[in-house]
Image (cartoon, rainbow, N blue to C red):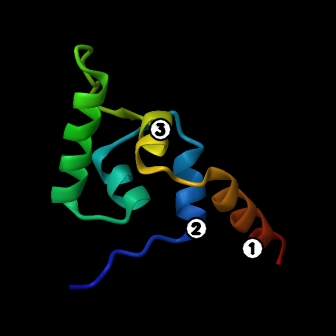
Amino acid sequence: MNKRVVSIHKKYALIQQSWLTQRDVMDLAECGPARAAEIRRELAEKVSPRVLPMRIPTGLLIDHLDIDVEYITRVALLSLKN
């Protein structure tokens, strides 16, 4: 099975957004639709008893996946300079 690979520029654009769709979650987590749905369920459990909106808050996903925002930002900006 092939691993989904998303460019650093796409990830940088995604972490700049306030809210993410299911497709955005798939891109940021580099996963398929089944895993993205599982991540959504995990996030819904995390914020329970509150209700998770249809679009997922970016900060919540970044914290859940432990994404290194500084690294993505640094690499994306360095590659733009070249």
Q: Are marks 2 and 3 in contact (CB under 8 Å)?
A: no
List the residue tagged with mark 2.
Answer: 8
Going 79% across and 69% down the picture, which residue do you hit? 78
- Three-letter amino acid code of the residue under disc 2: Ile
Q: Which mark is residue 58?
A: 3
- Three-letter amino acid code of the residue under disc 3: Thr
List the residue tagged with mark 1.
Answer: 79
Disc 1 crowd, CA 10 A, few/some/many (<14, 14-19, 20+): few
Q: Are marks 2 and 1 in contact (CB under 8 Å)?
A: yes
Per the image, label 2 sits on a secondary structure element best described as: helix
Q: Quick one: label 2 or label 1, which is nearer the N terminus?
A: 2
Q: CA distance from mark 2 to mark 1?
A: 9 Å
Q: CA distance from mark 3 to mark 1?
A: 23 Å
Q: Nearer the viewer, mark 3 or mark 1?
A: 3
In-front residue for pair 28/48? 48
Per the image, label 1 sits on a secondary structure element best described as: helix
